[in-house]
Amino acid sequence: MSRTIIVSNRLPVNVSKRDGSLHFSQSMGGLATGLASFYKSHGSLWLGWSGYITSKIDEKKYITERLNKDHMHPVFLTRHQIESYYEGFSNNTIWPLFHYFTEHTVYDKSTWEYYKLVNKLFFEEVKHIIKPGDTIWVHDYQLMLLPGMIRQEFPDVRIGFFLHIPFPSFELFRTLPWRNYILEGILGADLIGFHTYDYVRHFLSATSRLLGLEHTLGKIHMDGRIVKIDSFPMGIDYDKFANACNDQYVQKEIDRITKNLQNQTVILSIDRLDYTKAIPQRLRAFEIFLENNPQYYEKIKLILVAVPSRSKVEHYQNLKIEVDELVGRINGNYGRLGWTPIWYLFRGLRFPILTALYNVADIALVTPFRDGMNLIAKEYIASKTCHPGVLILSEMAGAADELGEAIRINPNDIESIRQALEQALEIPHDEQIQRNQEMQSKLKRYDIHRWANDFVGSLNEIRDQQLKATAKLINTQVRRKIVDHYKKSSSRLIFLDYDGTLVSFQKSPDRATPDSQLIQLLQSLASDQSNEVVIISGRDKETLDAWFGELPLNLVAEHGAWLRETGQKWTTIESLKQDWKKDIFPIMQLFEDRTPGSLLERKTFSLAWHYRKADPGLGEMRARELVDTLSYMTSNMDLQILEGSKVIEVKNIGINKGRAALKWIVRQEWEFIFAVGDDWTDEDMFQVIPDHQYAVKVGLSATKANYNIRKTHDVRTLLNALIGDSTS
């Protein structure tokens, strides 16, 4: 039976040692809490660190056996690994950078090396437990290299990755020295999930600008795979929080808290003590509120719960001091005998106390500077089934997209927070209930189970699409068939596209010169008396002459405008006009001037505007503008506009690779025909290849070819196999 293996930095269980004995308790992290119910109900296996550091073999064995019984598998880390990988690179580099706190970001090569090392350790543990048919679901920023490592060793395994924190804009992400390694690691997954579409957009921008990967509708074609990037707003265990007020233990805590509050209006703030949460800003806003609203003295209380976090890190120590001083100042300035405006708790809370606070709170103040999702906001709304309440929510939290009925604020605007508090206090109970019910209906529909099932379902869908895309992929059996057919044939016709087929795409179209191995391969193919080899390219004839003029090859330039048979001179496929260039050239030259990095190539019978080196966003926008402009200008001319890979080309109508290929195809009954290309300009060639022969498209995109091959390297491997088998 196939399993889902969840991999995260921490397990949902925390192991500690007290009084000489090992103790197992539930972890407090948001991921562990959120996924615990899904993991238990779906028979999953969870792999991660237990929080316990030991070098003792007997303790490791005991912990492993104990956790295995609950379908968990531990990864054991040393103290130094935790300090460098987790506290170092993960939380001193990735965490602040991805939350837009560049002033706290540390770029330390040694912690990066440990980040790679620990990701490798996690991979080794995955390798030990993985079975055929398993699905691997990797979570969060501590393990961004892991999907790529798994993919390299297990190319056919189903892999999902979910990032629970924001993915920053390209301008921030590009500052990371190891940015490409991070992207390539994440792209090892089949499905990559984020909480919001903003993060999806930022990730796609980074892959396009840094790796040159194009995407269509959130899908990237790379290394012969389809990778889907999508948003999945994480839900909560809605029923657990909605029904909490009916639990006897929760009700007991509600009664105790209510008695202590003595009918005061309650504002609740719960968060980890982290600089991304804007806790000091909340306190300053509350201070201004008290200053402007003395009528609420002794009638209102802010319950501030700050859960300890990374207490050894200087930034967090300073934050703790700042919060302590603000609480002390506000309580000192505005407190009265028997009343303090702030009730301050610096600790974590058990579920009964947490949900009791949610229930009694009249207002929840959730104002992070930046947050991947923020489940506290959702938990608060879900808990308001017995008592109404108002949510004040930062527009920078991922949850803000879903909870539109909350009062939204900019966390940098303290005055707006103060105004939101006043607004929240004036909202009638009926309106509070109506707002909450609308948000509750969304949270109930898309709860943690729906979120997890949606992600896993999408992962299965993308894998099905990959399988369909690979149905025409040249496998070992097909390759053997092609080689055997080639070997038995005495008359062979071979069409070879150049860019993207025989050589990989480069940043610039003028840097793809053939290497010595390719020249030797073509020499061997063309020297066989049974072979007629045709290089059929969009390149100009001067370039093809310079590269291949000395080889016994046929050449086709400018997508079929020029032909040169072996040992003969160049001829045009028909009499072509060039007078149109005087009108079109200035327009395309203007786009070259307005688009830094672009290049206008002037061929004999065509003009080609390349934008591979331009900024991807600007290039795509200019390309659309250019096509629109050219379409209008050429509407009454015998011209066609070709859109290739990062290139717009204008040429005479009727000139294409299919027409050029027919010049050779109709000459005789060929026993073996093979045509390979990667671009949509090659589709005309594929269309004229007889069905029983071999038209091959590089990549997995839709095609008229009857076969696909993954990448350039595989094309060369196949051609070398033809030579080897035919001469053996």
Image (cartoon, rainbow, N blue to C red):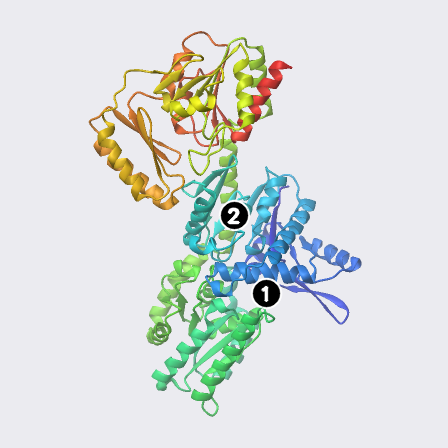
Image-based side of 449 in relation to 83, left or right: left
Corner quadrant of residue 63: bottom right
For the residue carrying disc 1, how many other residues have a C-alpha within 10 Å: few (<14), some (14-19), or many (20+)? some
Nearer the observer, 481 or 573? 573
| Residue type highlighted by circle 2 | Asn
Q: Quadrant of the C terminus?
A: top right
Q: Given the current orientation, which residue lies at the most extreme right position? A: 58
Q: Given the current orientation, which residue lies at the most extreme bottom position? A: 337
Image-based side of 353 in relation to 384, left or right: right
Q: Given the current orientation, which residue lies at the most extreme top position? A: 668
Q: Secondary structure at mark 2?
A: helix
Name the disc covering residue 195, or none: none
Reading the image, the residue beneath label 1 is 28
> Label 1 vs label 2: CA separation?
32 Å
> Could you tell me if the residues under marks 1 and 2 are in contact, i.e. CB atoms within 8 Å?
no
370 above or below 127? below
Horizontal and vertical percent position of residue 247: 54, 69
Q: Earlier in the sequence, mark 1 or mark 2?
A: 1
512 above or below 437? above
Reading the image, the residue beneath label 2 is 180
Horizontal and vertical percent position of residue 318: 53, 75
Q: Is residue 659 visible?
A: yes
Horizontal and vertical percent position of residue 525: 54, 17
Nearer the observer, 533 or 345? 533
Q: Secondary structure at mark 1?
A: loop
Corner quadrant of residue 545: top left
204 above or below 601? below
Corner quadrant of residue 584: top left
Horizontal and vertical percent position of residue 158: 57, 41
Q: How many marks?
A: 2
| Residue type highlighted by circle 1 | Met
